[in-house]
Amino acid sequence: MRSSTTRPPSTAERLLLGAIGLASFLGLWWGMSASGLVAKQFLPTPLDVLARTQYLLTEPFAGATLPEHLARSLERYAYGFLLAAGVGVPLGLLMGWFRWLDAMVTPVFDGLRFIAPIAWVPFAALWFGTGIGGPIMIIFSGAFPPCLINAYRGARFVDAKYIEAARMLGTGSLRTILEVLLPASFPAIVAGLRIGAGLGWQSLVGAELIVASAGVGYMMVQGQSNISTPTVVAGMVAIGLVGLVIDVFLRQIEAFVRHRRGLA
Amino acid sequence: MSAIEFDNVGRLFERDGRSFPALDGVDLTVADKEFVALVGPSGCGKTTCLRMAAGFEAPSSGRVLVGGAPVPGPGPDRAVVFQQFALFPWKTVADNVAFGLRNKGMAAPERRDRIAAIIKLMGLDGYETAFPHQLSGGMQQRVAIARAYVLDPQVLLMDEPFGALDAQTRVVMQEELVRIARINPRTVLFITHAVEEAVYLADRVAVMTQRPGRIKEVLDVRAIRAAENWDRHARVEDVMDLESFVHLRTHIWRSLREEKVGGER
C-alpha cells in the first residue's frame, strides 16, 4: 500500500535539509536588508545582529547586559509559570473528578481562555503598577489554560478500570485522587505543562512592556525607542533560543515519564 | 457466611432514549465457599451480573445480596479480577499488591508478611520491583489475582480472568487457581465463555440464555467430579480427556448452541 505522505528523510538528509532551510531564511533576510529595499535602520542584517548580540553579552544596554536581562525575565517567568501550574493542574484534576466543579468552572474558563495574554496588559499595569505582579499575571494568563485543560482531560478520561479497581480495593476519595487519578493523568499533565511553558514564555515580551527596570522585553522596548533595531532582534533571538531550551528540557521529562509508564 | 444471591434480578440499559432489557429474572445462588462458573452467549449479561455483585452497577429490579445484605457499592470484601487486569501501571508489582492492604490501615510488618506470602503463592518472587508493562500477560494476571487474594476477601469475582491469555498460559493459570482454591477456598463467581474452563474449575456451572439473560440451567459438576475422582489427575488435559468430563462439556455446548449468539456488549 502506498503511504499517504512521501518517504521520510534519513538523519543525514534531515540535517542537510534543515541547514538549507535555515540558510535560505538567513539569505532572504540578508538580501532584503543588503539590497536597500528596506532601510537598514528598519531591518538590520544578520551580521549586525550578531555583532550587537556579542556587544550586549558584556556591555549593558538599558541598565543591564543581555544575560542580566535574561535572568530577570526568567525569574518573572518562573513565578508566573509555577503559579499557573500550581493552580491549573490541581484545579483541572478536581474538575475532572467532581462533575459539579466542572459544571461551575468551565463556563468561566471558556469565557476567558481565548483572551490573549497581552489583552491583560492594561489591567496588569493598573493593578500592579511596575511591580513584579503585572508580568506574573500576564505570563500566568498565557501558561494557565493548557495546564488546566490537560489535567482536566487527563482526569476526566482516565480509563474507568483504574477507578473501579481502586474502589473495589476500598480506596477513599482523597487517596484515589492522589494515587490513581493523578498518576493516571500524569502523561497528559506533563504534556500540558510543556505547552503551558511555551505559551507562558511567548507572553514574556507583552508582560515586560510594563516593567520599569530590566528584562529582555524591557530591553527590546528600549531598543525600539532608541531605534536600535539590532537590539530588538537580539532580544528576539535570545527569547527564541531560551524558549527552545525550555521546550527541549520539558520534552526530555515527558519522554522519561512515558518511558517509565511503558507508553513509548 | 458470604453467599451471593441473585433474586429475580432484572437490568435495563438506556440507549437513544429507549430502554433495552439486558437481564430478565436472573435467579442464582452461589453458596458460601462455592465456586460457580457462569457461561453464556456473548452479550447475554454475564458481566453485568458480576458487576452488580461487585457493586459497580445496581439492578433495575430484584435484589443482589452478598452475605444476606444488599450490595451497597464496591468494597474489598468482594475483590474483583478483571479481564484486562486493571493493574496500576505506575506502581510496582509489590505496590500494586499492597494497595488494598494500605486502605485497611494494616501495620507495616504484618502487611509485609502478607505480601511476601501471596507473592510466593502466586509465583511472583523476584518480580516485586518490576512494573506491570515489563511482565507478560500471564504474569500480570497473577499480580491481579494476588492483589485480590491478599485482601483475604470472602467473595472473589472473576470476569473472564484468563480470556486475554494465550492457550498455554491459560492452562497453567487454571491449574494454579485450582491449587490456590484448595489451600484457601472462597465464594467465587467466575465468568468465562470457555466451557471446558468452567467445567474444570467450578463446583457448579450456570448456563445463561441469550439476551435478555436468564439462568437456563445449572449443572452440578462437584458430584460428578467426586464420583469419577477427577482429582487424581494433576493435569488439565488429563481431566479433560475423561469420559465424564467430555460428556458434561458436550451437554453445556449443546445447551449454548441452542441459544443464538446475541449482539456483542
Image (spheres, rainbow, N blue to C red):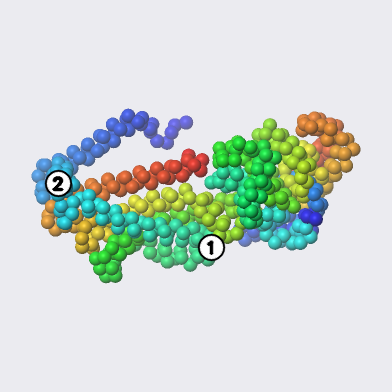
Choose mark 1 or mark 2, whichever is in front. Answer: 2
Q: Which chain does the residue under circle 2 lie in?
A: A
In the image, taking residue B138 as reference, residue B231 lies left or right, namely right
Q: Residue at x 72, y 46 (%)?
A: B191
Instruction: Indicate the position of residue A121 as horizontal and vertical percent values.
Output: 27, 64
The amino acid type, in three-letter code, at marker 2 is: Tyr
Q: Which residue occupies the foreground of this view, A164 or A180?
A: A180
Instruction: Indicate the position of residue A189 as horizontal and vertical percent values.
Output: 45, 52
In the image, taking residue A160 as reference, residue B197 lies left or right, namely right
The residue under label 2 is A55
User: In the orientation shown, which residue stands out farthest toward the right?
Assistant: B227
**Could you tell me if the residues under marks 1 and 2 are in contact, i.e. CB atoms within 8 Å?**
no
Alpha carbons under labels 1 and 2: distance apart: 55 Å
Q: Which chain does the residue under circle 1 lie in?
A: A
Q: Residue at x 88, y 35 (%)?
A: B228
Q: Which residue occupies the foreground of this view, B138 or B240?
A: B138
Q: Residue at x 68, y 50 (%)?
A: B151
Q: Secondary structure at mark 2?
A: helix
Question: In the rendered image, which quarter is residue B27 located in?
Answer: bottom right
Q: Which residue occupies the foreground of this view, B71 or B177?
A: B177
In the image, taking residue A136 as reference, residue B57 lies left or right, namely right
Q: Residue at x 43, y 33 (%)?
A: A3
Q: Is residue A116 above or below residue A264?
A: below
User: In the orientation shown, which residue stands out farthest toward the front?
Assistant: B109
The residue under label 1 is A98
Instruction: Indicate the position of residue B203 as horizontal and vertical percent values.
Output: 82, 44
**Is residue A228 something that shows in the picture?**
yes
Q: Earlier in the sequence, mark 1 or mark 2?
A: 2
In the image, taking residue B253 as reference, residue A173 lies left or right, namely left
The amino acid type, in three-letter code, at marker 1 is: Phe
